[in-house]
Amino acid sequence: MLTTLLPIGAGRATVAGFDVAGQPGEVRRRIGYVSQLGGADDLATGRENLMLQGRLYGSSKAQVERDVDEVLAVLDIAGIADRRAKTYSGGQRRRLDLALGIVHRPEVLFLDEPSTGLDPQNRAHLWEHVRKLRQLGTTIFITTHYLEEADTLCDRVMIVDNGLVVTEGTPRDLKRQVSGDRVVLS
């Protein structure tokens, strides 16, 4: 709903100061979205995918070329940028997906299950890149089933069950709420 892909059934939401239901175009201009399934065109090169994405957001060709070079360097995929996306490994593909979500410099980035299917090394690299984006001022929403990922990357965590918020807070506060509980198996 916050990415404007689904209608809001009830209530009201704003993203980057714009009403999601009333101003979806303004919201879309300010967000990046990286789905669990990715979004790259397999037959295009990484660079071509990124150029198209940047141009779709209205930047000039010269500006997009600079942005693409920057994001390729930041995500350490410059060396494979001119290969077709279908030749990328899982970790390289995930970094390309992340690059597609940020090449236009969004204010807010939505990551849906960003590390699903990644090996531990690529998962650690992805986390490093997400931290860099956060340091640059991007607000990041992560949907994850990995509590370690939420604990490591998030300033605030919200646990949702069947569409209802069960609890929310900082990772430290949430851990304090359950500390002392233990399970004994025999």
Image (cartoon, rainbow, N blue to C red):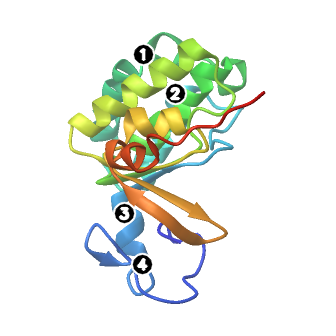
Dot 3 lies on which element?
Answer: helix
Whether residue 68 is visible, yes or no, is no
Q: Which residue is mark 2?
A: 95
| Residue positioned 34% across, 51% down in the render | 156
Q: Nearer the viewer, mark 4 or mark 1?
A: 4
Q: Which residue is mark 3?
A: 29
Q: CA distance from mark 1 to mark 3?
A: 26 Å
Q: CA distance from mark 3 to mark 4?
A: 12 Å
Where residue 160 sits, quadrant-wise, is: bottom right
Q: Earlier in the sequence, mark 3 or mark 4?
A: 4
Q: Is residue 159 above or below residue 165?
A: above
Q: CA distance from mark 2 to mark 3?
A: 21 Å
Name the foreground residue: 182 vs 51.
182
Q: Earlier in the sequence, mark 2 or mark 3?
A: 3
- Position in image of residue 27 (x %, y %): 38, 69
Q: Which residue is mark 4?
A: 20
Q: Nearer the viewer, mark 2 or mark 3?
A: 2
> Which class describes the residues within 10 Å of circle 3: few (<14), some (14-19), or many (20+)?
some
Amino acid at dot 3: Arg
- Position in image of residue 3 (x %, y %): 49, 65
Q: Which residue is mark 1?
A: 76
Where residue 182 sits, quadrant-wise, is: top right
In the figure, is residue 74 to the left or right of 35?
Answer: left
> Which class describes the residues within 10 Å of circle 4: few (<14), some (14-19), or many (20+)?
many
